Amino acid sequence: MERKRKMSVAPRNRTIAVGFLKGLNRKKYYGLYADLENQYARGTNQYPDDITSAYNLLLNHKSTAAPKTRTAPVPAANAAVDATTDTKVPAITFLQRGTPVAGSDGETLP
């Protein structure tokens, strides 16, 4: 009877430990969780057996940052365009010699 009880408690403890690890901050503990998943995929199960060993694993882990994705900054919709900032807007510029010629709307821009 004692053996049967131990057999039913072990999977429960393992489930709690894995649930604890899944609830961690993914940015801070990215390397730890990725290592555990990769080791399991290679046939080496190093997931902790209980919550105590999961916590000890966390305490002894040297954190590695998650890979950073490069995203372009999104300009605010209401932001005033500063003439000194370099905006990466595709444009064509023409140079005229002599006196400027007005455009189709009759305006000459500097």
Image (cartoon, rainbow, N blue to C red):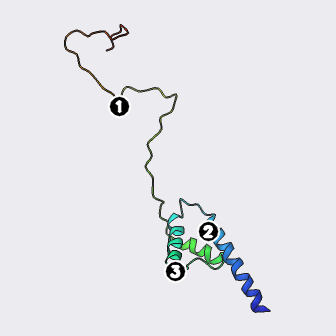
Q: Are marks 3 and 1 in contact (CB under 8 Å)?
A: no
Label drawn at residue 90: 1
Residue most extreme to the top: 106
Q: Position of residue 94 (x, y in %)?
A: 26, 21
Q: Position of residue 46 (x, y in %)?
A: 55, 79
Q: Position of residue 63 (x, y in %)?
A: 50, 66
Q: Amino acid at mark 2?
A: Leu
For the residue pair 100 and 59, the one nearer the viewer reads as 100
Q: Of label 1 and label 2, which has the lower sequence position?
A: 2
Q: Residue at x 30, y 26 (%)?
A: 92
Q: Residue at x 76, y 89 (%)?
A: 4
Disc 1 packing (10 Å; few <14; some 14–19; many ≥20):
few
For the residue pair 13 and 40, the one nearer the viewer reads as 40
Residue most extreme to the right: 1
Residue that numbered label 3 is attached to: 43
Q: Is residue 93 left or right of residue 7?
A: left
Judge depth for marks 3 and 2 and give the one in front: 3
Q: Position of residue 31 (x, y in %)?
A: 49, 66
Q: Of label 3 and label 2, which has the lower sequence position?
A: 2
In which quadrant of the rendered image does the N terminus lie? bottom right
Q: Secondary structure at mark 2?
A: helix
For the residue pair 71 and 55, the one nearer the viewer reads as 71
In which quadrant of the rendered image does the C terminus lie? top left
Q: Of label 3 and label 1, which has the lower sequence position?
A: 3
Q: CA distance from mark 3 to mark 1?
A: 52 Å
Q: CA distance from mark 3 to mark 2?
A: 19 Å
Residue that numbered label 2 is attached to: 21
Q: Secondary structure at mark 1?
A: loop
